Amino acid sequence: MIKIEGLVKKYQHKNAQNKNEWKTVVNDLNLHIEPGEIFGLLGPNGAGKTTTIRMLTMLTQATSGEIMYNGLNVKHDQEAMKALIGVVPQQINFDQDLTVGENMELHARLHHMGKENRRQRIAELLEYVELSDRVNDNVRLLSGGMKRRLLIARALIHNPKILFLDEPTVALDPQVRRRIWDLIRRMHREDVTVLLTTHYIEEAEHLCNRVAILNKGKLIALDSPKALCERVGRYVVEWDALDERDFRFFMTREAAAEFAATVDAATTIRRSNLEDVFVELTGRKVNV
Ligand SMILES: Nc1ncnc2c1ncn2[C@@H]1O[C@H](COP(=O)(O)OP(=O)(O)OP(=O)(O)O)[C@@H](O)[C@H]1O
């Protein structure tokens, strides 16, 4: 179980008058994530997702608040916690002069793994992410999707129980994205708790058991994707109004169809999605 209580992060920055002031980028975040969940932090650019992951993975210190993993506290048990977690960063950060196998080896040594254990685990993980045949290639030769898969393999080297992925499929094409999703689902089946950030609505809908929507550092909604969609209405009627697309939500397809029949324009009826939830809650889209 991951327990996040009253988490706050403030950064100092210069305001328009060139004076130092504090900006709160994560604002009193409270979350409990159950073992075995795939949990998504969803929000637009600048919502505070990466900063939250950085605090959870001990890359930056919280200004205040508590983070606990299975009863261990980030402030006091860093070494034990590092053994428990794996991190897939947003930036691809391999040693560019090394091969696929050497990058894995380096990481395994950082985790103080013995020689035989390293050899076995690296072979097993490269097979897992379907990169065994690239073991002797320089990492520069890998495609974007292969690099992401290798980042995942590297993060799993020490058998972590919790895996953090920051925008795991950013800039990948849809087919490659689906392959990464399969990999994440497979880890989930193998009892790894997954916490990922994304600004892809579809990713959150397909993968996550629960989603926390962040906006300007604040938690604005928390539930399963289905329950969040039901909160606004299961169906949407859309039509072209004067200079924009207008829409209304309904709980049943029948109610949506009944309303659509009264609209003096061509209408579309569709299921609601997390993008609709986001627009309803914040008045803006996730992907802008
Ligand atoms: N080291 C820093 N110093 C000052 N401000 C920062 C720092 N890191 C992040 N911020 C600010 O904190 C806010 C939240 O950034 P963060 O990267 O956590 O958002 P995000 O939701 O992950 O967005 P993205 O999808 O763009 O990564 C932004 O306004 C950003 O400019």
Image (tube, rainbow, N blue to C red):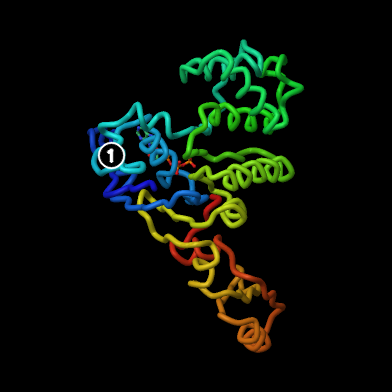
Can you say whether 217 is above or below 155 in the image? below
Label 1 near ligand 1 (CB < 8 Å): no
| Residue at the spot 61% in from the left edge and 73% down from the top edge | 242
**Position of residue 19 measured from the top left corner of the image (x, y, whole percent):** 23, 33
Task: Please state which of residues 228 and 164 is positioned toward the viewer in this rendering.
Answer: 164
Can you say whether 165 is above or below 219 in the image? above
Task: Please state which of residues 45 and 153 is positioned toward the viewer in this rendering.
Answer: 153
**Position of residue 150 measured from the top left corner of the image (x, y, whole percent):** 63, 28
Task: Please state which of residues 14 and 82 is positioned toward the viewer in this rendering.
Answer: 82
Q: Is 275 displayed left or right of 58 in the figure? A: right
Given the current orientation, which residue lies at the most extreme right position? 133
Q: Is residue 10 visible?
A: yes
Given the current orientation, which residue lies at the most extreme front position? 116
Q: How many marks?
A: 1
Task: Please state which of residues 119 and 196 is positioned toward the viewer in this rendering.
Answer: 119
Report which quarter residue 258 is drawn in: bottom right
Q: Residues within 10 Å of mark 1 (few under 14, many from 20)?
A: some
Can you say whether 136 is above or below 275 in the image? above
Given the current orientation, which residue lies at the most extreme top position? 97
| Residue at the spot 55% in from the left edge and 31% down from the top edge | 156
**Position of residue 74 measured from the top left corner of the image (x, y, whole percent):** 30, 35
Q: Where does ligand 1 appear, by image quarter?
A: top left
Q: Is 193 displayed left or right of 52 in the figure? A: right
**Position of residue 265 measured from the top left corner of the image (x, y, whole percent):** 69, 80
According to the picture, the residue beneath numbered tag 1 turns out to be 10
Q: Is residue 243 visible?
A: no
- Callout 1, which amino acid? Lys
Report which quarter residue 168 is drawn in: top right
Q: Is 163 displayed left or right of 182 in the figure? A: left
Label 1: state its secondary structure: strand
Report which quarter residue 95 is drawn in: top right
